[in-house]
Amino acid sequence: MKKIVFATNNAHKLQELRQMIGERYEILGLADIGCHEDIPETGDFIEDNAQMKARYVKENYGYDCFSDDTGLDIDALNGEPGVKSARYATPGHDSEANIDKVLTKMQGVEERTARFRTAIALLQGDEMHMFEGKVEGIILTERHGTGGFGYDSIFQPIEGDGSTFAQMSPQEKNRISHRGRAVAQLIQFLTTQD
Ligand code: IMP
C-alpha cells in the first residue's frame, strides 16, 4: 500500500479521508510521522498555505503529502476573513469571537453573499497538484443551529432547504460543502492513478 501523509492533526478529518479512499493508500497523519511542530501558514492565499504545508512535510519527512486550507470569503467585506478565517478576531481559534466580529461588521449590510473555498495541495515526488472546492451562500444576521464548527451557524448555502451548515447532518453538509467537493476531486485523482 502506498503511504501518503495528510498534513493535519484533526482526527475527524483523517478518519473521514481513510474511509473515503479505500484500500489503495495508507493515510498517515502528522502525529503518525512524529511531526509535532507548528507548520508555518503565512501565505496570503489559502492555496499558498496548502502548498507550504505539503512542501514542509516532503522536505522534512520525505513523504508524499497533501494538505488543505479553507477560507470564508464575504463579498461585502472585500473577501474577508478569507485566509485569516481561523484567527479573524483573536490569535487563538475562537469561533464565537470570529462570528461576532463578522456579524458586527455586517450590521445593516444588505449584500450578504459569501462562499467557503477549500484548496488542497498534493505533492507527489516533485509534482504539485491543486484541487479546489467551493460552496456559495449567504451570511445570516444571527446564528441558527448548533452542529458543525467555525462559521457554520451563520452560513446558509444557496443549495439546500434554507438550513445553515450548523442545522445539517454531517452527511448533508459533506455532500455540498467546499471541503467535501475538494476532497472528492482529490480522491478521484488518487484512485484513478496507475
Ligand atoms: P482550516 O483550513 O480547515 O483549518 O479552516 C480554517 C478556518 O476556516 C477554521 O478555523 C474555521 O474558522 C473556518 N472553516 C473551515 N471550514 C469550515 C466549515 O466547514 N464550516 C465553518 N467554518 C469553517
Image: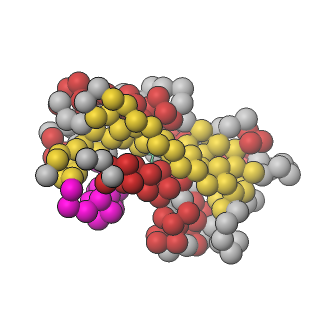
Residue 188 in the image: x percent, y percent?
39, 54
Q: 181 left or right of 26? A: right
Residue 64 in the image: x percent, y percent?
24, 36
Which is the main secondary structure of the residues drawn in magenta?
Answer: helix
Residue 190 in the image: x percent, y percent?
32, 49
How many circles with numbers are drawn on the protein?
A: 0
The residue range painted magenta reads: 9-24
**Residue 105 part of the magenta segment:** no
Where residue 142 sits, quadrant-wise, is bottom right
Residue 183 in the image: x percent, y percent?
42, 53
Q: In the image, what residue occupies the spot 60% across and 46% down?
A: 72
Extreme front residue here? 194
- Nearer-the-camera pick, 54 or 73: 54
Res 161 seen here: yes
Q: 185 left or right of 79? A: left
Tell me: residue 145, above or below residue 58: below
Q: 105 left or right of 185? A: right
- Nearer-the-camera pick, 119 or 34: 119
Q: In the image, what residue occupies the spot 58% across and 50% down?
A: 134
Q: In the image, what residue occupies the spot 43% across and 42% down?
A: 120
**Residue 14 part of the magenta segment:** yes
Where residue 19 sits, quadrant-wise, is bottom left
Res 144 seen here: no
Tell me: residue 103, above or below residue 144: above
Q: How is the image coloured?
A: secondary structure
Q: In the image, what residue occupies the spot 60% across and 63% down?
A: 153
- Nearer-the-camera pick, 62 or 139: 62
